[in-house]
Image (cartoon, helix red, strand yellow):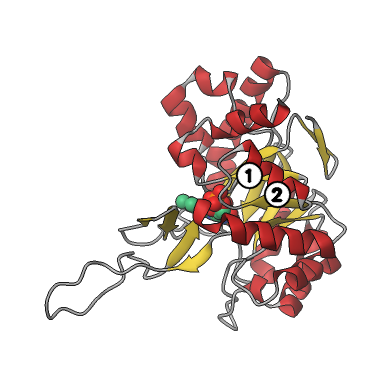
Amino acid sequence: MSVSFCGLELAHPIINGSGTFDAIAARRAFGAGLLHGFPFAAYVSKTITLEPREGNPPPRLWEAAAGMINSIGLPNKGLHGYLREDLPQLAEIAAGVAEQLGNAPPLITNVMGASATEIVRLLAACDEREEIAALELNVSCPNVKTGLDIGADPRQLEDVVRAVRPSTRKPLIVKLTPNTADVALCAQAAEAGGADAVSLINTLRATALAPGWEGEERRPWLGGGTGGLSGPAIRAVALAQVAAVAQRVSIPVIGMGGVRSASDARDLMDVGACLVAVGTESFRDPAAGARIASELAS
Ligand SMILES: Cc1cc2nc3c(=O)[nH]c(=O)nc-3n(C[C@H](O)[C@H](O)[C@H](O)COP(=O)(O)O)c2cc1C
């Protein structure tokens, strides 16, 4: 079950999707139990930005027929808050897991910036921290100048990845956006720019309307207006996009999107994913990662 990924040795192929499992909150809730049964072979942080962000106004979640739309808006402490407060706690959790299970889950820090300059500052600061094993770059961010998502335009994506790549010696995973015309072209652009791996899919842009009363204008339910759809509702899209990307790049592919079981994970691996991330399912079952890894093993 062990997997080599960009020079890292993982005990099994199941990791978490960024922003869907807070290891620090989980340790508060589950105590030592989390260390005995840590669900993931590597731990991915939620997205960290240069400056702190409060996130979007409520409501932030809408339950879809088979998943949810979130409009969390990437609240986080900002780079320095993360490095000072969260990273030491995450490293302590990883060391505790190693004591219990024999392997420390490598820490992957997910970052997002609105320009190459911002991303360089994020990657360079993370590069100095030995607790971080690899970086994941979330490119679902509007460019400060054009307003278009950096990851949606292959040419812009390649330029940004090429410009930021030298600022870290650690493996760089580019987390692609599914909200683009040709995700495989974007994956090729990330590879050409110097990415060591790509991960997909992020959430699909979506919205929901609040109930309308007689004579009233219908409004979006979510405080942020639109959000991202995740969970089983997007699994077939994820399978198609992971398959298309895996056929067109030679770097490793991390697949995710609606995975609830070993059979879902197996589907993504059979079309070319070397690791599989579990996201929304962890909200229903925080131990889902461990369950899926052990089902895969048997
Ligand atoms: C509540 C929530 C928060 C998320 N936050 C982030 C984030 O901070 N950064 C990121 O790159 N992806 C984020 N994602 C996307 C997930 O990592 C994953 O790509 C997506 O949800 C698809 O997987 P799933 O269907 O298993 O949830 C978030 C998803 C959800 C549901």
Residue farthest to the bottom, as pictured: 146
Q: Which residue bears the numbered disc 2? A: 268
Mark 2: few/some/many CA within 10 Å (<14, 14-19, 20+): many
For marks 2 and 1, give the CA distance. Answer: 7 Å
* Disc 1: residue Cβ within 8 A of ligand 1's nearest atom: no
Q: In the depicted view, which residue is nearer to us: 261 or 124?
A: 261
Q: In the depicted view, which residue is nearer to us: 156 or 187?
A: 187
Which residue does the image show at 63% across and 58% down from the upper left?
238
Q: Quadrant of residue 57?
A: bottom left
Q: Give the amino acid type for the residue marked by disc 2 in the picture.
A: Leu
Q: Position of residue 236 (x, y in %)?
A: 60, 58
Residue farthest to the left, as pictured: 214
- Above or below — where is 90 with respect to 50? above
Q: Position of residue 158 (x, y in %)?
A: 78, 72
Q: Give the amino acid type for the residue marked by disc 1 in the picture.
A: Asp
Q: Which residue bears the numbered disc 1? A: 264
Q: Quadrant of residue 73?
A: bottom left
Which residue does the image show at 70% across and 36% down from the upper left?
131
Which residue does the image show at 83% across and 45% down from the upper left?
6
Q: Pick the quarter of the image with the N terminus.
A: top right
Mark 1: few/some/many CA within 10 Å (<14, 14-19, 20+): many
Is residue 265 visible in this depiction of the protein? yes
Is residue 80 visible in this depiction of the protein? no
Q: Is residue 114 left or right of residue 172?
A: left
Judged from the image, the secondary structure of the residue bearing numbered disc 1 is helix
- Above or below — where is 284 with respect to 219? above
Q: In the depicted view, which residue is nearer to us: 194 or 211?
A: 211
